[in-house]
Image (cartoon, grey):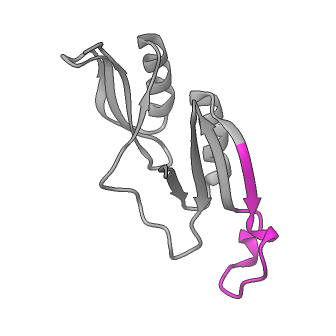
Amino acid sequence: MHTNVYLHFSGDCADAIKFYEKAMGAKTETVMPFSGAPPSGNLPPEWKDKIMHGSIRVGSTSVQVTDAPPGMYARPQGFRVTLNVDSPADADRIFKALAEGGAVQMGIEETFFAHRFGMVTDKFGIPWIVIHNKAM
């Protein structure tokens, strides 16, 4: 058994994928538009090119992504996706990129437990923690 994160977007999943490729070096694995699925009477025609299912690789982790159909999107709450990065420089760079157009809850800084730790919600509404841990 293993766990994956499945991020839902409100129609801007393709833009989010491009953003994550640039911001954190994500690699696109799969993109399946709604047009590849059997016809559905519940989906507006303008959604045919929206992403029904996608997968991006962030470091060694596969993150699933989708455009939630109209009326089914809910803004994420109650969790944060954590990026454990390899260096303070990586933490600073990635945090700055994720903060562009987003909202910083805690600026990236050194703490008693991490060389770098910060919390940000990106411009797509996804809440992140960026951390470079100290050896314990």
Query: Which residue is outermost to the front?
Result: 1
| Residue at screen point 54% across, 58% down | 9
**Looking at this view, is 6 or 93 the one in front?**
6
* Residue 62 position in % (x across, y down): 59, 43
Q: Is residue 27 above or below residue 42?
A: above
Q: Is residue 26 above or below residue 12?
A: above
Residue range corresponding to the magenta coloring: 29-51
| Residue at screen point 62% across, 28% down | 25
Query: Which residue is outermost to the right?
Result: 36
* Residue 17 position in % (x across, y down): 64, 44
- In the displayed structure, does residue 40 sit left or right of residue 25? right
Query: Which residue is outermost to the left?
Result: 112
* Residue 37 position in % (x across, y down): 77, 73
Q: Is residue 69 above or below residue 128?
A: below
On-image quarter of the C terminus: top left
- In the displayed structure, does residue 82 sit left or right of residue 23? left
> How many marks on residues?
0
- In the displayed structure, does residue 113 sit left or right of residue 48? left
Q: Is residue 122 magenta?
A: no
Q: Is residue 32 magenta?
A: yes
**Looking at this view, is 12 or 65 the one in front?**
65
Query: Which residue is outermost to the bottom?
Result: 41
Q: Is residue 27 above or below residue 123?
A: above
Quarter of the view holding residue 66: bottom right
**Looking at this view, is 6 or 23 the one in front?**
6
- In the displayed structure, does residue 129 sit left or right of residue 4? left
* Residue 21 position in % (x across, y down): 65, 33
| Residue at screen point 22% across, 19% down | 113
